[in-house]
Image (cartoon, coloured by chain):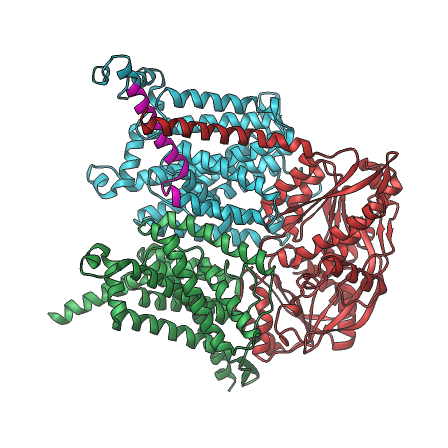
Chain colours: A cyan, B green, C red
Amino acid sequence: MNTSSGSKLDKYLGPLNGPQTMGRRLPFWLGFLVVIALLALAPEYLRRYDIINFSNFLISGFLALSLSLIWGYCGILSLGQAAFFGIGGYAYGIVALNLLNLHGNTDVAFIAGIIVPVIFAAIIGGIMFYARLRGVYIAILMLVVSLLIGMFMRQTADPSYTLGEAYLGGMNGLRPASASAPLLPSLIFGIGDSVIELDGRSVSFYYFVLGLLTITYLGLRCLVNSSYGYILVGCRENPDRTETFGYDVRLIQLSVFCLAAAIAGLSGVLYTAWGTYIHPDGFGVGPNILVVIWVAVGGRKDLGCALIGALVLEWASLRLVSEGEIALLVLGAILVFAMLLAPRGLAITLADYFNKAELLLRARLSTGNGVSRKNEE
Amino acid sequence: METFAAVFDVIYQLFDNIGFLILAASGLVIIFGMMGVINMAHGELMMIGAYITAFSYHAGIPAPIAIIFAGIGAGLVGMILERLVIRHFYKQLLSSLVVTWGLSLLLSQGFLIIFGPSILNVPTPFGNFPIGEQTFGIYRLVLFAVAIAMVASVWAIFTYTKFGTRARATMEDPDMANALGVNTGNIYALTFGLGCAMGGIAGGMFALTATISPFFGINYTPLAFITVVTGGSANAISGLISSALSLAGIQTGINNLVNVYIGYVAMIGAAFVILLILPKGISEYIERRKIRVRKVTNK
Amino acid sequence: MNKFLLRFVAGAAALGIITAVAVSVPGVNTAKAATDEEIVLCAIDDLSGDFSIMATPKTYGYKLAVKEINDAGGITVDGKTKTVKLVQYDGQSQVKRYQELAQKCIFDDEADVVMAAYTGAEREAARREVVRNKTIYWHNNQGEGGIADHYSFFSGPTPEQQVLPALKWMIENLGPRMIFIGADYNFCRAIGAWTRTAANLYGGEIEYEEYFPFGVSQWQATISKIQSIGPDFQVHCLVGGEQVQFYPQAQAAGMSLPTWSNVTIADGYEHKRFAAPSLANMYVTPGFIEDVPHPNSIAFTKKLRAMFPDMVYANEHAGFGYTAVKAMAAAWAKAGTTETEAVIDALESGIEVAEAPGGPWKMHGDQHHAAMHSYLFMVNEDHTLSLLTDLGYTEPTFLKEIGVDMRKEAPNRQFLPPDNPAWSSFFEGQ
């Protein structure tokens, strides 16, 4: 903002840039384009297996964005963010099993997978925020909620747990209730009379997820750099003062909590469609903490850094699995050292560092050209 | 006699459940309740205690001494971890969560690689006694007694010893304590070590009734956290006792009225409701009442 | 240049290297894809996490079988003699990993067969992925049975070989009054249904039946309840480190009623992990454990111990992991190719493994489950095992009675006892 190229860029990228996100100047946006291009061209130079994996990693990215939004920007840590992921996945699956034969597509299921977690978040969040709960208590309460849902879902092995054509299926995962019901489908969009099917293992599914993630990331960037974003940060930094300015902190917390639930739900929908499988393991302690780990290691106070944390850690843990029992040992060591080196997050610390170096480089160059930095400003 | 047996049965179960929750949470109440560190590796320190107990016992050392070894061993491991890692994460609740999750992976996976997937446990001592038609194990009552003894000694240490005063001063205001000549670094390490030692003793006690594997501790951690958070940190000791009492009471009641599944759900549900009504835990409510009573009597 | 610039350049270089490695690493894998000289067998098992106790010996069974096949010169398929390449992954006791690793087996390693999972949840996660990519899948420990799927094969015993013959013996020898307690999930729910079937078929009576969530470790309430009922014997399906604490607690409380359990000993060799006498008076029905006195079993255990001296106990998993690999070897040899449909035809023709550790073993092609022996053991005070009786060589007939013939058509679903019309009356009013 203080430099000339920054202000020029701001003209074009206006709502995307602002103090709430890192990477506002030209080098970042060039890098961003390069990464998008590399990812978009990935099917050209990677094998099918890698593409399937990348789809999976990108799906985790949504979950990381959703937690970064509420934790990094609004100061609400949820240790139960994976619950919304699971609810979204189940909602998608249950609706899809019931309506696929009727509609021939999963349009309604896709929407249900986003709406149901929002409704759930509105209820739970409403209770919590209007009871003025804060900090670690919300974190633990959300974990408790997730564990309770998980406990319920695990014991739904009894054949009486059916919702129409969907049998909840306990720990073995969601299944069709009868022989006539369809299998759990990948995404099938029906627009008018035409039908677009995105098989979870296909390149088109990968592009769909990549596109959706890019839109979500850019959309959230606009959001946090808008005045709403400033209020979010206000709620994080000092809720009482924000309140005295006349904002209803509870409502703001609830609204952002619901938005995060929608994004987490979307992640669950895509996961279910990707593997045509959803199971109650995701409600456990491990998967919930994993989301916190991605975001903390990347850097919770920046959307992009949280996203990078999720993608890199997911990639690393799957790579490590081939090494046998040593994998979890290495992962543990990575977490400990990452937090020791950069308690605010690895990606965010690196980015900060580049920022400083780049500013300095710019200053050098401009003084070298005989133009004083002061004039430029 | 029949009704006496039935009543005794329920009381026995209640003691059993209270003892279990207090034991699992007793170390955490210091580490989380007083020091404000979310220690996800607490279960792994219990696991270390269980391993030390089993190895010592099978080497011919009597079980009670083996359990004391477990406490010392886990306490030492805890102090080392505190100096190397944890001390960088005071006042950073959530970074401590991530780093201790990493430690828990390191410890459990390290034990798996070194000692294999399981070892032989220690037989349960003391036998049983009959009431009416039923028989009851004595060891479960010993668990309860040890749990109470541990809480009492934590209270005594922090109330009556010089270390306790200094520790409370340090937790309250480290800079001030430092200025008054307290070596806060040592106090932090010792307090953390004490919490880990309690975890080690708890692990040693459970080693006599459970199978021992590197993943022994993982399942105690969430329940221990729920107990501690429900108790709140206004007064860690009264919080722990009151939350264990209420959670175990609800669990025992529903267990007998409905079934174990609903009892378990009811216990976790109760923690949820208590936190909604008393967001800072039960102990804060107790403290408030105490102050109110004091004000009234002063008038 | 000042030090910031220097650091900037160094940092940029480092980041560049990391990016380059990150991008190139997935590509490097291409080199290790299957060569023409090898048949790829991909195995996913829990080497870490709660279930590593059970699944680790299974990986030993795989390794021994593959070594024997390769030492004998391999298998002749498609006109070439190929060795078997065993690819093993650690599922870390996490369901999601099974899904991801099954994909790795299929797309990265181009496996000819995938053998994966211990629990039902892991099995379904891996199996769904393997089956939808039209690859052969094996599950190699006891399961709830009844899965009728074209690509899925099961080497381990089913309730037909365990629950029915064992409970028949228990009812005849100990009396008809029983109680059932189990973990609240699919497998134990199925075992509960089979127990009900056995009780109805052989004149038993279930006086109390309850399912418990995972993680329950306080058992006094249940122990009191069982003591007040005083049954002739108990049927247990307690799963996981917390639930099995029932046994020391029951022993400490002085309850020593005979207990039949199909998840204890055979999978987790608890008699080697609990101090005696916690498990005294327990009855178990494995298809194989190293205490089975069959000559095959003795020879197998000896070879396995020689290869893996640290092994605590050769459990059912070790035996059926070995058997499954041997069965696949026979099927590849018979088909003369690794082409999936031809191999399935070979398997469905009724492959036999004469050297199976638990005694003779034969795949029934119409049902994708195997005929095998099962044995009834009792745990003594000192935790040694006594063989009470050989329950005989049991053919799988459950799917046949429902009318499934997988050689003609695979319904691609799971059947449970209530699906058998002859038994449906047992489950009315439940």
Q: Is residue A276 left or right of residue B265?
A: right
From the image, which quarter does the C terminus of chain C lie in? bottom right
Any magenta on residue B109? Answer: no
Q: Is residue A127 left or right of residue B59?
A: left
Which is more toward the observer, C314 or B244?
C314
Residue A268 position in % (x across, y down):
52, 38
Q: Can residue C106 be seen in this snapshot?
A: yes
Q: Which quadrant of the figure has residue A189?
A: top right
Q: Which quadrant of the figure has residue C113?
A: top right
Q: Is residue A144 left or right of residue C223?
A: left
Seen as rendered, the residue at the extreme front is C1
Which is more toward the observer, A37 or A71?
A37
| Up/down of C380 relative to B235, above or below | below
Q: Main secondary structure of the magenta part?
A: helix
Residue A171 position in % (x across, y down):
60, 51
Any magenta on residue A356? Answer: yes
From the image, which quarter does the N terminus of chain C lie in? top left
Seen as rendered, the residue at the extreme left is B299
Q: Is residue C397 left or right of residue C13?
A: right
Which is more toward the observer, A342 or A294?
A342
| Numbered circles on residues, count | 0
Q: Which quadrant of the figure has residue B60?
A: bottom right
Residue B95 position in % (x across, y down):
38, 47
Region of the chain picked out in magenta, as a range: A340-364
